[in-house]
Image (cartoon, rainbow, N blue to C red):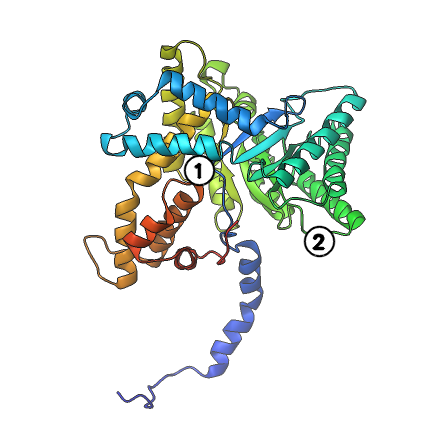
Amino acid sequence: MGQHETVATSLADTVREGIGAALAEVDADLARRYPGDPGTRQPVHTVYVPGDAFAADTVRSWGDQALAALDEHAPDAGALAAVLDIPDALAADVHDRVRAKLTREPIEDLRIDFEDGYGPRPDAEEDAAAARAAALVAAAYGNGTAAPYMGIRMKCMEAAVRDRGIRTLDIFLTGLMEAGGLPDGLVLTLPKVTYAEQVTAMVRLLEAFEKARGLESGRIGFEIQIETTQSILGADGRATVSRMIEAAEGRATSLHYGTFDYSASCGVSAAHQSLDHPVADHAKAVMQVAAAGTGVRLSDGSTNVLPVGPTKQVHDAWRLHHGLVRRSLARAYYQGWDMHPAHLPTRYAAVYAFYREGLEQAAARLAAYVAKAGGDVMDEPATAKALSGYLLRGLDCGAVDPTEVTHLTGLTRTDLDALAGRPTKTG
């Protein structure tokens, strides 16, 4: 058939135009609710430090303590591989990368805690701690010692602590503004959310701050912590977390699962409260589906089994933590909480092994997809999107290097962003 020949059709153009007009509102709603991945870096973990314990050297101190634990309990690649069952082919590379990470950037995301980890204090004491936190965070970003992401967890929007939480947030944000402005890596966490209206209240609070300080509307986002049963399933039987994402009006950056509060609210006994308990899996599955496509990321919670004491005890805690992190990664929870410096070696060992062991296969499949070369697996655009996202997350955390990804795929970071459906920018 020639290029300019026409084919027979039966429908008038007005039919197509009418359907387009009828679905215009739906098109706009889809674009608003499901913008896709924001294209920014997602940290692999969040470290919580009580407001009165945070100091100028906290990031470096955690790195040094993590290195000391590694040197004492797994001083070489073989020792670490034996404890964590890392394949021999990966052991040396993973061990070297973990050491380098703990030296260069031990913490990716740090939250100064004014909630459970801080507790009730006299107002003057918490005022001073919030102001001090702002000064230390501003100084850290100014002198290059900050974690890539830093911020506070305020007290929740429940009546008993609401005013205190609002005041602490105001003091912290005001202190940052007075010190030169809000850093790009600023992250705020709203805990113990039970009703979508509490998320709306947080939005109104941030709007008021932005207006008071002359900031662009929408400049400040926040995380929603999922640690109550009401945040998963409401009294009306609906998935409350979906309503919370909507109530955030585009400001929600992530959903963080709170292991122990949520488990306790379900009646799980203390000995069985864990990331892999069925109630945890159910909650996170609901979170995952609710957040899919919205640009809101997910974070798993933590284990409270600390790697301290004699080597055998540390190894047992390491195996538990490493297994839980691996389990989360396989379930597409790419972030989690770490509660102790000695958790960092196993966090990064699990993350690095996860991305390195699948690097060559993912790269080959993506290269074949781009080249339309086929192979033993026929991938679709959705799979190419997932493969690109996998490589991008590996690049962001230091598990893989840009040169090796380009060598294996022939693709640049910009190419990967495009295939992953991300804006062509890095965070």
Q: What residue is drawn where x is 34% and y is 29%?
A: 95
Q: Secondary structure at mark 2?
A: loop
Say what amino acid the circle numbered 2 marks. Ser
Q: CA distance from mark 1 to mark 2?
A: 30 Å
Quadrant where the N terminus is found in the figure:
bottom left
Which one is closest to the eye, mark 1 or mark 2?
A: 2
Say what amino acid the circle numbered 1 marks. Tyr
Q: Who is closer to the viewer here, 275 or 387?
A: 387
> Which quarter of the figure has residue 114?
top right
Q: 10 Å neighbourhood of mark 1: few (<14), some, or many (≥20)?
A: many
Query: What label does residue 181 carry, if any?
Result: none
Q: What residue is drawn where x is 44% and y is 37%?
A: 333
In this view, 154 is above or below 387: above
In this view, 189 is above or below 270: below
Q: Secondary structure at mark 1?
A: loop
Q: Which residue is mark 1?
A: 333
Query: What label does residue 217 carry, if any?
Result: 2
Q: Is residue 326 left or right of residue 222?
A: left
> Which quarter of the figure has residue 93?
top left
Q: 10 Å neighbourhood of mark 2: few (<14), some, or many (≥20)?
A: few
Which of disc 2 and disc 1 is earlier in sequence?
2
In this view, 240 is above or below 11: above
Q: What residue is drawn where x is 76% and y is 28%?
A: 164
Q: Position of residue 289 (x, y in %)?
A: 47, 44
Q: What residue is drawn where x is 49% and y is 24%?
A: 64
Residue extending furthest toward the front: 143
Q: Who is closer to the viewer here, 67 or 221?
A: 67
Q: Position of residue 325 (x, y in %)?
A: 40, 30
Q: Who is closer to the viewer here, 344 or 387?
A: 344
Residue 126 in sight: yes
